[in-house]
Amino acid sequence: MPADSVEREILIEASAEVVWAVITEPEHISRWFSDEAQVHARAGAEGKLTWRPGGRGGSRHRQSDMIVPIRVVDAEPFRRFSFRWNHPHGSRPDEHNSALVEFILSEEAAGTRLRVIESGITAVAPDEQGRSRYLEDHRQGWERHLGELLDHVASSSLAGSS
Amino acid sequence: MTAPTVAEEDALWAAMADPTRRRVLDALLEQGEASTTTLARGLPVTRQAVAKHLAVLDRVGLVAGRRRGREVRYVVRPERLDDAAEALARVAAQWDRRLARIKRLAESVQEQTET
């Protein structure tokens, strides 16, 4: 059971160059992800994502900025971009203390298919910020896609229980 | 099902974070019901290690042991697995939202470059 990864994808009617810019450039990132972003699309680059109180990401009840460190793992222009995040501040991220987010771009006739895989989600649990982020999301009731979960979690057992 | 408390959710995360433990859970899902000994046979870890992992899984309610004669047989408790599954579903839903925003942004940038 790949119990702690999720994979999603979407087809975008734009070139891979444009999609690449949107997922890696701070001025774009601040329009789909965090409220503010310090990101350099270069392997090994450290960066951070900041969510402001009252900003995007269901942070209505938060009193202060939430700052999440990231470290770029792989940056291959127009093809793939990956980073680790949610590791404790000041520590080097690895598979035990952070989640890995991978974007994979592939050009198709109709545009660019963008796949995202987040793995190691449970590894961030001991980290206070990561945990509170997930809990806050929980409280605010994100939409539930339980049907699609069957790809990710032991389908036989879930099918029998729900 | 009542919503898990913060402490419960923490314990669940921690229990699921260990890769060997997930393999134990996997094997148990496949076999339906199994003893420590039969589980250890299919895994590259000792019987003692399996017992230890089962104890952790039992503590957070992901598995339950039932005595059958001289041995204890374990089963997965799907309702707790649903809690873990829900946590993953939230992450998946977040990415769906982000991808939808990326799509809107990229398509509007694309339009601007074409005109």
Image (cartoon, rainbow, N blue to C red):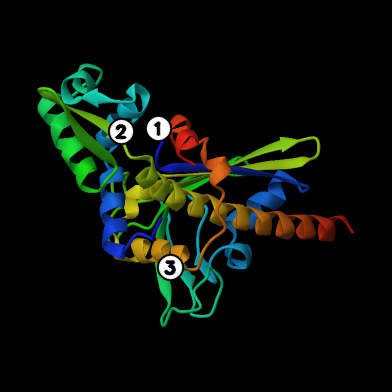
Check disc 2 and report the residue beneath it: B25
Assess disc 3: are there few (<14), some (14-19) or many (≥20) residues with their C-alpha within 10 Å of its C-alpha: some
Residue A1 got which mark?
Answer: 1
The quarter holding residue B78 reads: top left
Q: CA distance from mark 1 to mark 2?
A: 8 Å
For residue B35, above or below residue A11: above
Residue sitting nearer the eye, A129 or B87: B87
Assess disc 2: are there few (<14), some (14-19) or many (≥20) residues with their C-alpha within 10 Å of its C-alpha: many
| Quadrant in which the C terminus of chain B is drawn | bottom right
Kind of residue at badge 2: Leu
Kind of residue at badge 1: Met
Across the whole image, how many numbered discs are drawn on residues?
Answer: 3
Check disc 3 and report the residue beneath it: A136
The quarter holding residue B35 reads: top left
Image location (x, y in percent) of residue A95: 32, 44
Kind of residue at badge 3: Glu
